[in-house]
Amino acid sequence: MTRYRDVSWWLESCGDDLSPRPPLDGSVDADVAILGAGLTGLWTAWYLRRRDPSLRVVVVEREIAGFGASGRNGAWCAPDFNISMARLASLHGEDAARRMQQATYDAVDETARACAEAGIDAGFHRGGSIRVARGPQGVPALEHALAVYERFGFGDRYRLLDRAALDDRIRIEGAVRGLVGDDAAVVHPGRLVRGLARAVERAGATIAEQTAVTAYRPRDASGRATLVTTRGEVRAPVIVLAGEAYLTELRPLHRQLVPLWSLIVLTEPLSEAQWADIGWANREVVASTRLSIDYLSRTEDGRILFGGRGAPYRLGSPIRGAYDRHGPTHERLRGFVRSWFPVLRDVRFTHAWGGPLGMARDWHPTVAFDPKSGIATARGYVGHGVAATNLSGRILTDLLTAARSPLTELPVVGHRSPNWEVEPFRYLGVRYTQWALGRLDDRIARSGRPPTGRSLAERLAAH
Ligand SMILES: Cc1cc2nc3c(=O)[nH]c(=O)nc-3n(C[C@H](O)[C@H](O)[C@H](O)COP(=O)(O)OP(=O)(O)OC[C@H]3O[C@@H](n4cnc5c(N)ncnc54)[C@H](O)[C@@H]3O)c2cc1C
């Protein structure tokens, strides 16, 4: 379907024809009803059926599986969590922060293992990660990141490279040092999420597409909670709200997250000569120390994906397809590609897309189940959900089947984020932070002086 092929190059190139599965055909009863066929909903369905093949699991998706962030992302399957270990330690203690970080390494491993078990060809390639300092101003951030890993006992997984060692891996204009980690992988997000949807069906769960959830209700006297859809109701003792940024469209959750757009540009496949100039043979996932976020990956067929934030937050948190493309931001990203890799000054860009991330007021992701209401959720990954959704699927499976495990003791479980402010204060705060971080980045790059961490924008964005 053209409409869905246009969502991202990942959906276009995943090998499926993207025809929607049948919608829900009237009201049904289930044991677990899941809103959203992204990675969170699908991993949850897959692990639940694996745990108990008798469970009736129904996934309800407004568009098609992979329509959301899971089918659009930057392809990093990395051991990252949206909130720093230092912040986790201050909230939940050092040990909890360490266990959370260890769980993110395990989530990358488990994504690879589960894909192999489920027969999903997600193009999983463990090339590692590189965070680069483009100029001396970025070096303190790398040194600080390494010191934090060391403090929590993960220092042996990372190395600081000097310019020469970095150049051996990837040649980036202006890069002076790099922090390398061995754990991250790159995937084909389209093949991952679409393959997972098929695996979920093979495992015996049902996916109803083109079925929008318009409301939900907690458990009633019969012990069943409800997903109310345009095609009937799904009633089950447990409902799982796995709609990430789109959850803001449901009234009770409107202020739990803000939808923030991340945008991506993609080059044509590069020539061998261009790759000889750049290097990057091991397809590490790459980012710089910019406060306003950038992320890069190299596709299997030799293209460069360059992503970043910066598309403006809009008053009232609306989500519209039109926001997936933002000319000025996409143009800036193309400019970054040319400035990072001058050999690509004439490169052709074939695709540009984007999608909404879900961000909680305290930047803290949440995985939760309230047995009283029968409502479960996992959300608030921001730009770090590819591996973390797999972890959420396993945590939710333990929570829903009342299996206590080390996963159910992680600090992400049962976390409650405060609501975002009402408008227009939400708009003013988010837009100010977006604008100020962009300006600060430009100033840092011009001056060559590292950020102090003391500016208002940095304090607002600290997490
Ligand atoms: C441009 C971009 C780049 C990113 N890059 C990375 C990256 O490189 N690495 C990384 O780790 N993370 C990245 N992320 C984040 C990551 O993709 C997400 O955190 C993750 O995919 C979230 O999965 P999810 O299943 O929770 O949500 P989603 O994938 O958004 O799925 C939610 C699903 O719910 C459906 N839905 C929503 N509302 C309703 C409703 N009312 N009724 C029925 N269905 C509904 C949607 O259609 C959607 O299919 C990126 C995100 C974006 C947008």
Image (spheres, rainbow, N blue to C red):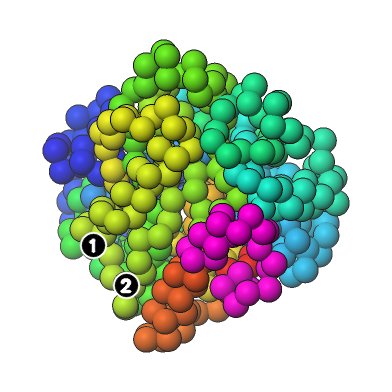
* Residue 96 % position (x, y): 77, 58
* Residue 180 % position (x, y): 69, 35
Against 133, is 244 above or below?
below
Callout 2, which amino acid? Arg
Q: Secondary structure at mark 2?
A: loop
Name the one closer to the observer, 353 or 294. 294
Residue 240 falls left or right of residue 206: right
Name the one closer to the observer, 144 or 321. 144
Q: Residue at x 48, y 38 (%)?
A: 340
Q: Residue at x 49, y 66 (%)?
A: 439
Q: Is residue 219 visible?
A: no
Marker count (numbered): 2
Q: Residue at x 73, y 44 (%)?
A: 102
Q: Is residue 148 visible?
A: yes
Please tell me in which quadrant of the rendered image residue 262 appears. bottom left
Q: Residue at x 28, y 43 (%)?
A: 352
Work out whether mark 2 precedes mark 1 in sequence or the reverse, and give the earlier one.
2
The yes-or-no answer for disc 1 within 8 Å of ligand 1 is no
Q: Which residue is mark 2?
A: 314
Q: Main secondary structure of the magenta part?
A: helix
Callout 1, which amino acid? Arg
Q: Which residue is mark 1?
A: 320
Name the one closer to the observer, 49 or 143. 143
* Distance between the alpha carbons at the discs numbered 2 and 1: 10 Å
Mark 1 Cα shell of 10 Å, populated few (<14), some (14-19), many (≥20): few
* Image: magenta residue range: 438-459
* Residue 139 % position (x, y): 71, 48
Q: Residue furthest front?
A: 447
Residue 463 falls left or right of residue 309: right
Q: Quadrant of the C terminus?
A: bottom right
